Image (cartoon, rainbow, N blue to C red):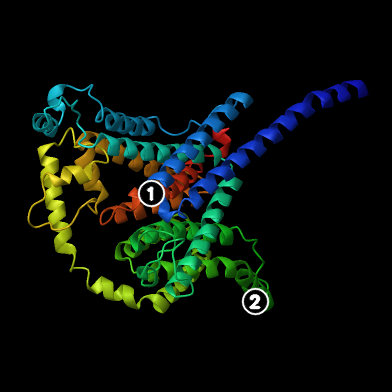
Amino acid sequence: MNTHAGATSVATNPSKKESRLTSLLHRMLFIALLLLVLLAPIPLGSNRDWSWSLCALLSGVLGITWVLLQLATRRKPFGQLPAVIPLLFLAALTWAWLQTTGWLPANWSHPVWALSSEVTNQVLSGSVSLAPQDSYTALMRLTAYGLVFFLSFQLARDRVLARRALWWVFAFAVVYSVYGLLSYWGVLRELMWYQDDAFGKDVRATFVNRNHFANWVGIAIVCALTIFFDYMLRAPRVPMLSMQSRQKRLDRFLARAWAPLAGLILLVSALVSSHSRGGFLATLCGGAVLLLLIDRRLRVVSLRARAVAFSALLVCGAAFYISSELLVERLEQSSIDAAGRQTIYQITLGGISDSPLLGFGYGAFEDGFKLYRDERVTKLVDFTHNTFLENLFELGLPAALFLFGAVLGLMLVCLRGVFSRHRDWIFPACGVAVTVLVSVHALVDFGLQMPATALLYSLVMGVACAQSYSSVRAT
């Protein structure tokens, strides 16, 4: 018997060591992914050629590393996501690539190529895209976002890693917010290695402008609310035997809650001090959706849930009261630039009606808009300030709907997870809320075209979708 037991021990120990090593490697890969996403805001939100190219390169390296790790460990990838979602995304990617090629029928190419050939007396290969190089860049970035989502979705099956990811988002957001507030208060006189008087007018942290920072930190605020609820609702319950035990329970609550609440105050203060109307309203919508889902999901224990919700709302309200004066002024003046944006929207819709199926090339909005601008537009227009219209203009109606459908599908997966999971449902609730947030912001700005924001959204949605399925069924 002893000999058999010893042989069994020898046979099983290598597999245990291999399992531990595999788990360690996956954790290290996930940490590398977190660092890639959360350090992306440092070089101006990665809004420069070299920085977004580096992000795309590193995401590709992490993707290859994950594939090699799967092959070495012979582990099957997590395949719970409905097949229609990746198919829709791949269809949009494929069409964006085909727009840059000369493989499509010649009469599909935009007429501007034929005109250019006549003017230059050169034979130019036509394409649907007016700016193939810009389309390649946009395609590279979109592929990187999809890869970050895929890696997050695969690696965040473990609830410990999922929870850690949101804590990391919260911690990095606090650091960036403190940096932005110090610049706003005049303690720091420059943004990284750049100097500009505008850095002291609004909180923008390391981003190129306040609106993009507001969108990024808005996602972080929803993550902070998520981990706050998760943290507090998992607190051990103390029997209510006397007033002393009630006081002890309150003391425990305050002892556990002070750090998340203090961080939340900083994030909300930074958001409000950015004076971004779109960012503030989008965050308000995302936070409201999260609180609504929590209330609907926790009706049985709604007293405790609403107590936590009241605490979070009280903190957010206090931060708003402290730093909202200039934001309120900007909200009151919201009609001043509305006319200009309406003009851009009308011109963009005219372009969409001229090429509803083919589009003008993914990432080629600036070149396409020049063909339609008139005397009403006196400035350079490189973005529509409405991502939905811009994608319809660039990709055409079918491909844009494929892309929208993929994002909507992810949100529906999370919504299903909120009501189907018995535990850890707070993570898919976060996914629904951040999707509402970025969608509302996309109606009035181009936040998801900032690489750092798109990377963060991809990471959070990967975590949310991974936790939308039971770990029992996933393994």
Up-down relation of residue 316 to residue 100 (above or below): below
Image location (x, y in percent) of residue 83? 39, 29
Which structural element holds mark 1? Answer: loop
Residue 437, located in which quarter of the rendered image? bottom left
Choose the circle earlier in sequence order: 1 or 2.
1
Per the image, label 2 sits on a secondary structure element best described as: helix
Quadrant of the rendering where the N terminus is positioned = top right
Drawn side of residue 279 relative to residue 28, left or right:
left
| Amino acid on which disc 2 is placed | Gln
Q: Is residue 425 visible?
A: yes
Q: Nearer the viewer, residue 149 or 225?
A: 149
Camera sees residue 409: no
Find residue 48 and name its label.
1
Residue at 37%, 67% (x, y): give it. 196
Q: Is mark 1 in CB contact (under 8 Å) with mark 2?
A: no
Above or below, 292 against 24 in this view is below
Quarter of the view holding residue 194: bottom left
Residue at the far right in the pictured view? 2
Q: Name the residue rendered at 32%, 63% in the picture.
A: 281
**Residue at 83% of width from left, 25% of height from top?**
10
Residue on which the image places disc 2: 247
The Cα atoms of the two marked residues, 1 and 2, are separated by: 54 Å
- What residue occupies the far front of the structure in this picture? 121
Residue 81 percent coordinates (x, y): 44, 34
Residue 249, image x and y in percent?
64, 71
